[in-house]
Image (tube, rainbow, N blue to C red):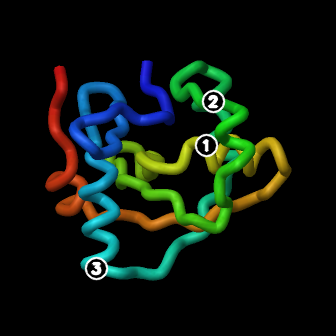
């Protein structure tokens, strides 16, 4: 089961989901190298990830997160949507505080391919 805490790979942060590991430090480097405007991400649509136990967060840590820091999203073309690969604690806090949307950066499919590795 993935956790929103990420796992350490060397000094970096990763997000594991399904068969894949996403390198969050590499995603942040891509965003610094290729800036873009954030999109608004409605958080209510993400609540099910918590209810089903798909994503687990530390609520105490979530309470101190910065809701102005954009989420990072990977496109999921098969379902015409996107997966939050960084920012689940912020999503938790936003839901807890009834914040309807958070800013987020949507990576391109090519960018995701460069930061994702298959783990099983």
* Residue 66 coordinates in the image, percent (x, y): 65, 59
Residue found at x 79% / y 57%: 99
The residues bearing labels 1 and 2 have C-alpha atoms spaced at a distance of 7 Å
* Residue 33 coordinates in the image, percent (x, y): 25, 78
Q: Residues within 10 Å of mark 2 (few under 14, many from 20)?
A: few
Q: Residues within 10 Å of mark 1 (few under 14, many from 20)?
A: many
**Relative to 11, does residue 41 appear above or below in the rendering?**
below
* Residue 87 coordinates in the image, percent (x, y): 53, 49
Name the residue beneath numbered marker 3: 34
The residues bearing labels 1 and 3 have C-alpha atoms spaced at a distance of 25 Å
The residues bearing labels 2 and 3 have C-alpha atoms spaced at a distance of 31 Å
**Relative to 95, does residue 32 appear above or below in the rendering?**
below
Answer with mark 1 or mark 3, whichever residue precedes in sequence: 3
Quadrant where the C terminus lies?
top left
Residue found at x 76% / y 45%: 95
Answer with mark 2 or mark 3, whichever residue precedes in sequence: 3
Residue found at x 74% / y 51%: 94
**Relative to 71, does residue 103 appear above or below in the rendering?**
below
Q: Residues within 10 Å of mark 3 (few under 14, many from 20)?
A: few
Name the residue beneath numbered marker 2: 58
Q: Which mark is residue 117?
A: none
Nearest the viewer among 86 and 109 is 86
Name the residue beneath numbered marker 1: 89
Q: Quadrant of residue 92?
A: top right
* Residue 10 coordinates in the image, percent (x, y): 22, 39
Q: Residue furthest front?
A: 11
Residue at disc 2, secondary structure: loop
Question: Is 86 situated left or right of 27 in this image?
Answer: right
Answer with mark 1 or mark 2, whichever residue precedes in sequence: 2
Residue at disc 3, secondary structure: loop
Residue at disc 1, secondary structure: helix
Asked if labels 2 and 1 touch by Cβ distance under 8 angstroms, the answer is: yes
């Amino acid at each position: 089961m993935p956790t929103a805490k990420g796992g350490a790979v060397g000094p970096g942060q990763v997000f594991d989901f399904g068969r894949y590991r996403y390198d969050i430090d590499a995603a942040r480097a891509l965003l610094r190298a290729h800036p873009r405007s954030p999109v608004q991400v409605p958080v209510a649509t993400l609540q099910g990830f918590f209810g089903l136990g798909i994503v687990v967060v530390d609520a105490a840590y979530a309470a101190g997160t910065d809701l102005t820091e954009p989420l990072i999203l990977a496109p999921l073309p098969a379902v015409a949507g996107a997966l939050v690969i960084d920012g689940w604690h912020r999503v938790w806090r936003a839901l807890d505080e009834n914040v309807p949307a958070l800013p987020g950066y949507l990576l391109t499919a090519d960018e995701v391919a460069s930061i994702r590795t298959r783990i099983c």
